[in-house]
Image: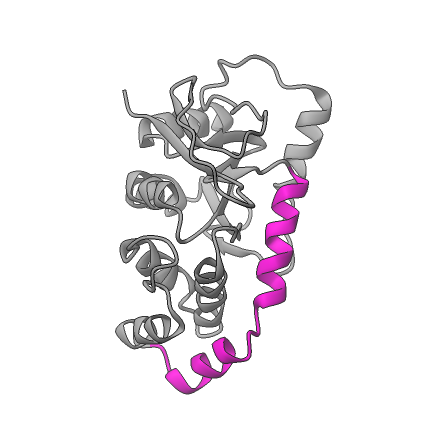
Amino acid sequence: MENKQSYLIPFSIIVAGVLIAGAVWYTNGGSRTPVAATGSAGQESAAGNAVESRALQLRENDRVLGNSVAPVTVVEYGDFQCPFCGRLHANINEPLREQYIKTGKVKFIWRDFAFLGAESQWASQAAHCAGDQEKFWEYHDYLFEHQNGENRGAFSIANLKTFADALGIERVAFDRCLDDEAYAELVEKNTQEGRSVGVSGTPTTFINGRSVVGAVSFAEFQGVIDAALQ
């Protein structure tokens, strides 16, 4: 059985391998318990449901893939440097888009939770700059496909600009957007809002309000979506 893995918020990262409901966590000693993707952890409190339902509310600057009136809303809070976000992307990206997004059953929303360092913040800003040229999702995918360690230069400003070339993004406007940190405030706002709805690690995904924590398999992801569709 595949491990459900995620990164927890570190202000100074302490690595601790803790086996909880099949999940491996990198933690700073916090007491948060992950919610099982299948709901087997038991019923959530009314307060918890209210907090998670806020994650479903569309925001002005949300990046949305799919039909805006799709019956199921999937919201991912992620960090482009997080290896487990990369693993979740590899697990679910293609089948989710083919089976659920293109068929109008699911809309997918990405929200930045850029907490692993400067390169996380730059990568998120760059993706939004690409979005100015209708290339957000292409850039989003390219970032996950080109992870190479954390804060080791993989997502340096120079490399992020080179990625734009690879995707046919016009460089003058893109470079100005990135150099001016046009989306720094939005990235920080998304991250803070993630904390306000209970996100304490990445990837954290909300499927019609139910939280799914970690790099779960597509089968597990699919089970929660199908339950929501019913």
Report the residue at 46% width, 41% height from top. Answer: 106
Query: Taking the image as drawn, is residue 189 in sight?
Result: yes
Q: What percent of the width, then of the height, locates residue 64?
A: 50, 54
- Residue 81: x and y in percent read 39, 52
Q: How many marks can you see?
A: 0
Question: Residue at left 72%, top 21%?
Answer: 46
Q: Where's the N terminus, which quadrant?
A: top left
Is 75 situated left or right of 60 in this image?
Answer: left
Residue 103 magenta: no
In the image, residue 71 above or below residue 147: above
Residue displayed at 42% across by 87% down? 172
Majority secondary structure of the magenta segment? helix
Q: Quadrant of residue 5?
A: top left
Q: Can residue 72 be seen in this view?
A: no
Q: In this view, does 20 lie above or below 129?
A: above
Tell me how the rendering is colored: one colour
Along the viewing direction, whichever of 12 and 75 lies nearer the viewer:
12
Outermost residue on the bottom side: it is 172
Q: In the rendered structure, which segment of residues is drawn in magenta? A: 169-197
Q: In this view, does 176 lie above or below 210?
A: below
Q: Residue 152, how many percent across, how many down?
A: 34, 60
The answer to whether residue 189 is magenta is yes
27 or 92: nearer the eye? 27
Instruction: Please state if 146 lies on the left or on the right of 101 as rendered.
Output: left
In x, y percent, where is residue 99?
33, 39
Identify the residue at horizontal 43%, vertical 26% (top origin): 226
